[in-house]
Amino acid sequence: MEPLTRRRFARSAAAFTAAPFFLKTSRALGARYGEFGDFKKRVALIGSGWYGKVDLLRLIQVAPVEVVGLCDADANMLEGAAEIVASRQLNKRRPPTYKHYADLLAEQRPDLVLIATPDHWHALPAVAALDAGADLYLQKPVGVDVAECQVILDRARKLERVVQIGTQRRSTHHLREAKERVVDAGLLGEVAHAEVCCYYHMRSRQTPEQAKAPVPEGLDWELWTGPAPMREFNSVAHPRGWRAFNEYGNGIVGDMCVHMLDAVRWMLGLGHIDRVSSSGGIFVDHASIANIPDTQTATFTFGGLDVVWNHRTWGRAPDPEYPWAFFLYGTEGTLKADVHKYEFIPRGGGERIKGEVKMELAEYPEDDTEEGIEKHVAPAVREHMRDLLRNIDSRGRPVADIEEGYRSTAACVLANLSMQLGRTLDWREDPDQLVDDHEANLLLARPYREGYTHPGMV
């Protein structure tokens, strides 16, 4: 595709007058893009479903990038993504579409690749994109097993690529405010315990009979399954319900715990996990087609600090105001926080410190009408993209650098291994392995389906 020159940039900007949310003057362009007005990188998206579009469209909002390719195993998702990208990107072009990421990378050679596939399809395209010369925005968790995460981290460091992981709590304005006003200011005193939780009823309740369905037209189920074990198609797995199955991810601990555990690590400056123990299972909803736990508790130990995770996909949250959240308990007070708000409660009374999310609908009115968007999360994704772009320019490490993503992901994967094995696991990061546990170390890499090779086995 023709490079996005300054002349074409100016012509494309003039064309924006037809869309109500697009910018109408060069001054408005400068106001929207700010420091990234000259960031004209070639960008590709692998995994063009729900959050792939959320991520890419937030990037388009903050920089005049050129989308040069979209990839997905579902032709219908590709079509919808291509239409909205053509209406939103600056040059108004419809990006070419690809079924396989290898073809996209070979033909387009993008500067930046966004990956938002199901978890079991993170590692192979991530490694391929890094090898093809691209920087990377990779949705959390980093991989579906610990060995995948290690390979991506090692490859990024060896090739000196910039990699941002989609743990955007680190870029959430009110949480950054809470870190500065409460944690960094020392108001908590000594933090001796933390909790993370999710009580959303997000595990599918469909039975195997209810989920029976033919493969939808346009979906390549063989390719979608990729390196995961082959299962018969069902209507829960695609679209968006694949997290209900262990074959494609790590359940709710891999989906929701990784966000809040990463936030606690960031808030408190915690490094790698030392020990994890976990228990749980399917205790309530035995009829569902889902095979992930409906109940789980995990204790993550970082040095002398325990961070305890709980999830239940049934019943009520102990604190209904904070059903998906983290809690920091200090000698001088408690900090409660989630994606909507935070509250510091000082020990013994006194004035509470509060903050809440600030949605940016006046600045980005397209957020108000975009299908599937989480309006309260959009500002954090934009800031996460800005942080990535700054570090691409400086060749620095972004706030959710691959190493931080690796540590948070590995902790969550190890929690599931602990639950599976029924014992506590001790971890050391140099070398990356479990201590004196040969059986568990063999489980750090999942077997790939025939025809696919685990990147850690190459």
Image (cartoon, grey):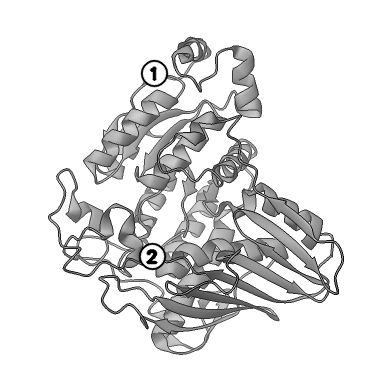
In percent of width and height, residue 309 lies at 55, 75
Q: Dot 2 corresponds to which residue?
A: 456
The answer to whether residue 134 of the structure is visible from this angle is no
Sequence-wise, the earlier of marks 2 and 1 is 1
Q: Quadrant of the C terminus?
A: bottom left
Left or right position of 409 against 244: right
Quarter of the figure with residue 225: bottom left
Q: Dot 1 corresponds to which residue?
A: 2
* Mark 2 and mark 1: Cα distance apart in space: 37 Å
From this view, report whether residue 437 is shown above or below residue 245: below
Mark 2 neighbour class, 10 Å CA radius: few under 14, some 14 to 19, many 20 or more: some
Q: Amino acid at mark 1?
A: Glu
In percent of width and height, residue 57 lies at 46, 35
Which residue is more in the foreground, 293 or 157?
293
In percent of width and height, residue 396 lies at 64, 45
In this rendering, the label closer to the viewer, 2 or 1: 1
Q: Look at 47% across and 50% down and name the residue there.
A: 138
In percent of width and height, residue 137 lies at 49, 46
